[in-house]
Each structure stands twice: as structure tokens, then as C-alpha cells.
Amino acid sequence: MARATSNGNHMTIPPDIRQRAEAMIAAERDAFAARNPRSAALAAEAGKHFPGGVPLHWMLDWETPFPLFVTSAKGSHVTDADGHVYADFCLGDTGAMFGHSPEPVARAIAAQVAHGMTTMLPSDLTAKVGALLSSRFGLPFWQVTATASDANRAVVRWARALTKRPKVLVFDGCYHGQVEDAFVKLDGDKVVMKTSLLGQVSDLAATSVAAPFNDLTAVEALLAKGDIALILTEPALTNTAMVLPDKGFIEGLMALAKKYGTLICIDETHTISTGHGGYTRAHNLAPDFFVLGKPVAGGLPAAVFGFSAEIEAKMAHVLATKVPGYSGIGTTLSGNMLALAAMRACLEEVMTEAAYAHMTSLAEMLADGLRKAVAGHGLPWSVTQIGARAELVFSPVPLRNGKEAAASMDASVERALHLYLLNRNVLVTPFHNMTLIAPTTTQKDVSHLVKLFDEAMALLCGKGEM
């Protein structure tokens, strides 16, 4: 194997591995096409009305010759149109983190459908769900939205309304759904709008700032200007190569926010993998706002944002004194009866401490297995874990910010690994090397994934025939 070359504090992918990755991609794409004729036919049929044959263009991110079509998903396994059964470590990119169609959620949905789905009125589930959310996550007041993007947009609007300040601070490399205010990044020391954003007219860098993760000095310099309404952050960067917070970073961030009169929102849509109450309860945090989307209703579209009693009192004053008319916060289907029924069942019967204990222990088993495989092949890579989420990272040391994360990623090697696994009946998230463990995942599933990763790494290192 060729020697890796230095890239700052990290290591690039050796050229010989990248060459083998490209060869593996070609071979695995051909194998995928040969083994999935029914998916090919469905893609052609669906393509008459859906671009690429998919109802959401993200479904093309698997880099297969055509989309893989699913006929059923249950627990931690997915069956495709050609009858192949996959161990699923993607789990809807966290949307099905607690397994596909958990029995308590499925029962609750079936029961509620017979009594109505949406009325734009509260139901008898409202008080129960509010109490469950408050007990679980520690904030007394809540609102329900359809997605985490909606929840984060609402929080941004509220923060600006409450503080009378214009700007939002996010971290370079962060992900907060479709929220426009988060589409900025660092270009050297300059904050710029992400060029990938479609159809944006005004320059978001005028009202949003980006800071390097794990850098309290940089954050304080920005907050000291007195114009930042909200810090919107994940406890760990999760939509790039995963970056964990330094010890005390999140706590220091909250202290700085309080010092400079800035509100703070913890977005746990991905880091809910941490534990029973997310990263927030695991570390005894008390943010002004808290957001949770994707898995909170067991896979049914729903999200929540919580807030402190102090924030609620200020909200009430704003609502009582503002000009009448639509606030720009909320949609008709938000908080519908079906979503609340699913949420109650998920919080009460699925997102249990026992489930998290199982998920975390298997994630540790997976992370340990991947580390041994990496070491066995002498690769300059590492594995990062946060609760039930584990990720293979192309860096010999833990990443500390978005810049390092971006530098560590390699699309060719990622794609080769993902396609190799997919053709052997294992799904991992297509965006990077992220894996999730569900309550229904088994030790056998984990051992098989580690074995396949080890095989793929061996091929990338030139050990064996493709």
C-alpha cells in the first residue's frame, strides 16, 4: 500500500486505495444492476412522473445505477422488490432510529386513524404528550411541527422576535435541515453562503455567522458584538464526518450565550442517539430551546421544539402585543392527532431506557469491531461513536471542526464501501460512513457488518481479487 500523505493534522486517502475504490465502484454497480431487475423496471416506470424515479431526490444519493425499491421494512430489516433482505444500519437516516414500524407505534396509528387524523384542534392526547416530553427532556413547554426544519425555523423566528437582534450563529459543517439561516460556512476566516443552496436571492451571510466548532474563543468574539439572537447547534456535528464536542465545549457555549444575552437552541434530531434524554439530559444542559425531529413519532412525520418557562413568558408577551396576522410560525398539519398518537407510543413504549442500553452496547461492539479491522489493515482511519451512532472516519485522530471533517472525507472510498455492503444485503447511510443501531438490531447483524467492512477494506488495500 502506498504511503498516505499529510493533510494538515490528518491523512489523505492513499492514491492506490482511491484507484481500487474506483474499480470497486464500477464492479459493484454492475453487480447491483444484475441482481435487481425488478427495481430497474420500477425505476423506469416511476421515472415517467418522478425525476430519477424517486419522490425525493435524496433517494438518488445511494449512487446505484437506479434506485433500490423497497417492498417492506420491519424492525431493523428491509426487503427490496427483488426479494433481497437487508440488515438496515441506515434506518431512514435516523427517521426510523427505533426500528421500522415499531409495534406500539403501529398499533397507536391504527387505533387513531379510526377516530380522526387532523382537525386543527387539540385532542385528549395533548396533555399526556406534553408531560412525556417535559419529563424526558427537561423543558416545561412544547410545540409540535411536521419536521425538524419547521421546528428550527420557528425557533429562529422566536429568538429574533424575543431579542430584537438580527443574526443567528451556527457552526461550520452543521446541519439543521432546510433552515435557510444555517446555509453559511467558513471560507478561510470569511463567512459565506453555501453555493449549493438553490434559489436563494438575498445573501444569508448578512444575517447568519458561522464559527468553527470546538472554538469558544471564536464564538465569544462573535457574541461580543451584541447582534446575535440565537446560537443554533447540534451537540456534535453529524451530517459531515462526525465531530464530537471537546469536554466542556457545549457547557462553555451555554455560559457564553448567557453572558452576552444570546439565546441557545440544542438541535438533537441526530444526537438523540446519545441516550434516553438525548445529549441534553445526559449532560444536564438547560438550553433556552430544544429541537427533536425524525424519530420522535417512530417514523411518522413529526417534530417538536421545547422551551423554558422564561422563554414562554416572553413569547406570551410578544403574542399579546404584536400586530394581528400570521406570524410565519406553524402549519395546518402541525400537532395533528395522528402525530400525537404516534409520539405518545414512541416516547412511552419504544424510546425506553432498556432500548437505549441495547442500542448503545451494540454500537460499542460495532465501533470496537471496526477499529480492530482498521488496525488490522494498517489504515490511517478511526471510528467515532455517540450512543447508538457509530461512524468510520478517514482520519487517524478525532476531528475537531467542520474544516477538518470536510478535509477527511473521500467520496470514492465512501461510495465503494457503501456499494460493497449494499450488494451483500447491508444498508448504511449513503451520505458518509454513518451507522445506526436500532432496538431490533442483533449481535449477528453487527458481526456481519464488521465482517463485510473488513472484507471491503482488504480489497481496497489490494488483498484479494475484486
Image (tube, helix red, strand yellow):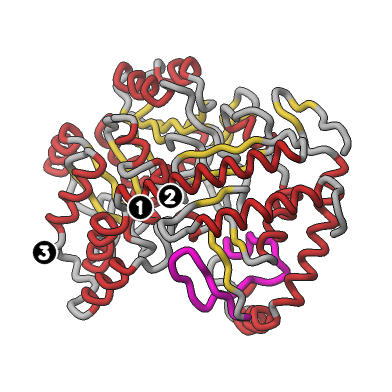
Question: Residue 258: where, in percent of width, then height?
Answer: 29, 21
The magenta span reads 58-82
Q: Secondary structure at mark 3?
A: loop
Q: Is residue 251 left or right of residue 135?
A: right
Q: Are marks 1 and 3 in contact (CB under 8 Å)?
A: no
Q: Quadrant of residue 395?
A: top right
Q: Nearer the viewer, residue 381 or 221?
A: 381
Rate crowding at label 1 as few (under 14), some (14 to 19) or many (20 or more) other CA atoms within 10 Å: some
| Residue of label 2 | 359
Residue identified by numbered label 3: 124
SS category of the residue bearing label 1: helix
Residue 73 highlighted magenta (yes or no) = yes
At 15% across and 58% down in the image, what residue appears? 126
Residue type, mark 1 in image: Ala
User: What element does badge 2 sit on?
Assistant: helix
Quick one: label 1 or label 3, which is nearer the N terminus? 3
Q: Residue at x 74, y 53 (%)?
A: 455
* Res. 202 visible in picture: no
Q: Is residue 95 left or right of residue 431?
A: left
| Position of the C terminus by quadrant | bottom right
Q: Which sits earlier in the primary sequence, circle 2 or circle 3? A: 3
Magenta span has 13?
no
Q: Is residue 53 visible?
A: yes
Residue denoted by label 1: 355
**Residue 427, above or below 43:** above
Callout 1 touching callout 2 (CB < 8 Å): yes
